[in-house]
Amino acid sequence: MEKSEEIDGNFFESLPEGFIANAMARTSPKDVCTLSLVCTLFKSAAGWDAVWEKFLPPDYQKIVAAADGCSKKEVYLRLCDYPVVIDAGNKSFWLHKLSGKKCYMLAARDLSIIWGDTPRYWRWISIPESRFAEVAELVSVCWLEVRGRIDTSLLSSDTRYAAYLVFKSAPHTYGFEYHPVEVSVGLIGAENQTESQIKTVFLEPEASERYRHGEYERSLPGRRRMGVFSRLRGLASRANATPPQIGPKRRQDGWLEIELGEFYNGKGQDGEVYMSMMEVKGGNWKGGIIIQGIEIRPKAS
């Protein structure tokens, strides 16, 4: 028994380090980190540039400034931990740390916002918490419509993604207390085109909590800035809509996010992903939210 265990223990140590590194490069970043704990030889192989270069995008040298002198593992971790603003400030790019899959955020300036260039309804401001030069602050609208698109060729293939609206709720936010918004994600121009599935969600955290605890309908008469006609329209729209299921979640960076939907990006699939967030049925005025952008990242399993 002891001789068998000794043979098994020496087996990995007898393998060429380059062979182990090449095998690791065919796995995932998460697997490489796990395998590095097996033995000292695996730990050494896990640091090879040939391993981590497999997880980097082909054009990483154009994305990461001053990458010279850094190991490929250091470059990989930098792209995971520090999103890079690209496309003239309209997008940010980073890698999902566990899988190496590509992630993007479309800046508010890269989105289609109805009345977005009308100062009466929207204004563009700069705040230190944003990774982009400008964010969109909703002044006041009764027709809220925000849309975004991204080419599937920019994303990792054979990957299930989800899209999220990233925003803040200012102290003076109003109009979202009793009106959920409709969100959707879909693929267009793809060989296997998928129709978007519309769902309703709350942008206000307190509203989702009221709904979850059965207090939503009881609190409806207290709505702000709504006339009788608007209330009737709101009641009619809720009768035909899917009940809201979720509210926003607080991110580590302090922003809120709400999932718009998910999609699968297959191998060799050409087309565009379109994402939308709308509230046009209630007829009430609303304002106060600050939109940083729409984030597209691998869906957590």
Image (cartoon, helix red, strand yellow):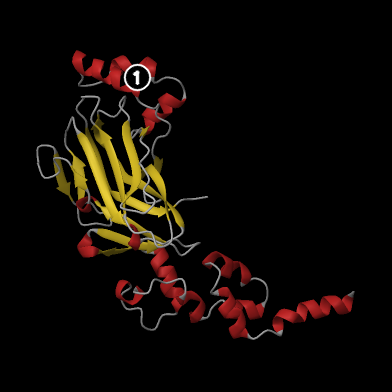
Among the 4 quarters of the image, the one containing residue 39 = bottom right
- Locate residue 168, reporting x and y percent: 30, 42
- Locate residue 172, reporting x and y percent: 23, 33
Task: Identify which residue is drawn at 31% across, 26% down.
Answer: 177
- Locate residue 52, reporting x and y percent: 48, 75
Does residue 109 lie above or below 280 as drawn?
below
- Identify the residue position indicated by label 1 in the image: 239
Q: Is residue 240 left or right of residue 31?
A: left
Task: Identify which residue is drawn at 28% across, 57% down.
Answer: 131
* Residue at the front extreme of this rendering: 191
Task: Identify which residue is drawn at 21% across, 30% down.
Answer: 286
Q: Foreground residue, 10 or 23? A: 23
Among the 4 quarters of the image, the one containing residue 45 = bottom right
Q: Amino acid at mark 1?
A: Ala
Q: How many marks?
A: 1
* Residue at the right extreme of this rendering: 1
